[in-house]
Amino acid sequence: MTRSFVARWLTRLLGMAAVAVLVYWMLLPLAALGGPALGVRAVVVTSNSMSPGMSAGDLVIVRSAHADRLAAGDVVVFESEGRNVIHRVVAVNPDGSLTTQGDANAVADQVPVDPASVSGVAGGAIPYLGLPRVWAESGAWASLGIWGALMAVAVWWARWAVWPVEVRAS
């Protein structure tokens, strides 16, 4: 094997890895734009109250839910004090309100949740996809800057996978 052969394949491998990273990070805008058409939406987890199943920075796919179909065990998204909260229903009270609790919390939430304020039931979570938003909201500008620099490097490396050396040389 010649050095140029190894270098060419290493460059191609890094380029393909960069494309994979970019496709992964493009899921966020795709989920935000295409989700409503499919009856789902994306919500970024902003705390670790649902650890270990969901961590801060995960992107959760949320589907619509009927209030009368909510049951203990469902992970619901509801609005509280102007922000989205993702917690598990631990009980449906006789008056129809819900008692919720974060999986990582020792005690249930003190204020019952009105089923009308539930915007949906959480489906799958995509790890790390919402981290840039969490960093921006918490003022972690260094982390956000490093992420931006890494994305720029990924774009630069991706061009090697998209445009092979033979095409660029001509």
Image (spheres, rainbow, N blue to C red):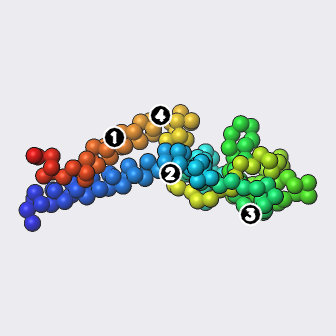
Q: CA distance from mark 1 to mark 4?
A: 16 Å
Q: CA distance from mark 2 to mark 3?
A: 24 Å
Q: Which residue is mark 4?
A: 141
Q: Which residue is mark 1?
A: 152
Which quadrant, please, contains the N terminus? bottom left
Say which label, 4 or 3, has the lower sequence index. 3
Amino acid type, mark 3: Gly
Q: Is 148 placed above or below 163 here?
A: above
Q: Which residue is mark 3?
A: 73
Which residue sits at x=12%, y=60%? 5
Q: Mark 2 packing: few (<14 Cα in 10 Å), some, or many (20+)?
A: some
Say which label, 1 or 4, has the lower sequence index. 4
- The spot of residue 63 in percent (x, y) is 65, 55
Q: Which residue is mark 2?
A: 128
Asked if the residues shown at circle 2 and circle 1 are in contact, with their CB atoms under 8 angstroms apart, the answer is: no
Q: Secondary structure at mark 4?
A: helix
